[in-house]
Image (tube, rainbow, N blue to C red):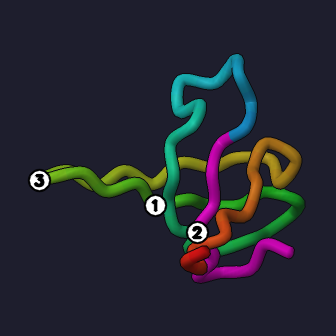
Amino acid sequence: MILPGTTVKVINADDTYYCFEGLVQRISDGKAAVLFEGGNWDKLVSFQLSELEAVNLKKK
């Protein structure tokens, strides 16, 4: 289940952000706004929920 605060990975192979991981900021109308951070830049991008997969951050 994807909720705000969830770390997600982009699974749409046709997307520029494919395999990027980010943090869900908000969800509305079947879309999620995902925050990507890297060094000195931040980017907020909207995706369909079907294009995202929750990332399991637990150690094995």
| Quadrant position of residue 26 | bottom right
Q: Report x, y in % for residue 17.
A: 53, 33
Taking the spot 63% from the left edge, 76% from the top edge, the residue there is: 6
Classify mark 3: residues with Cα within 10 Å, few (<14), some (14-19) or many (20+): few
What's under tag 2, amino acid-wise?
A: Thr
Of circles 3 and 2, the one toward us is 2
Q: What range of the chain is rendered magenta? A: 1-10
| Quadrant position of residue 42 | bottom left
Measure how far apart labels 1 and 2 are at the Cα level.
Answer: 9 Å
**In the rendered image, which residue does mark 1 sit on?**
35
In the current view of this chain or complex, which residue is farthest to the front? 60
Question: With 25 as the anchor, is 13 left or right in this view?
Answer: right
Of pointers 1 and 2, the one earlier in the residue sequence: 2
The front one of 38 and 56 is 56
Of pointers 3 and 2, the one earlier in the residue sequence: 2
SS class, disc 1: strand
- Which disc number belongs to residue 7? 2
What's under tag 3, amino acid-wise?
A: Asn
Q: Report x, y in % for residue 20.
A: 50, 42
What's under tag 1, amino acid-wise?
A: Leu
**In the rendered image, which residue does mark 3 sit on?**
40
Of pointers 3 and 1, the one earlier in the residue sequence: 1
Measure how far apart labels 3 and 2 are at the Cα level.
Answer: 20 Å
The front one of 30 and 17 is 17
Taking the spot 70% from the left edge, 46% from the top edge, the residue there is: 47
Quadrant of the snapshot with the C terminus: bottom right
Q: In this view, does 5 lie above or below 9?
A: below
Quadrant of the snapshot with the N terminus: bottom right
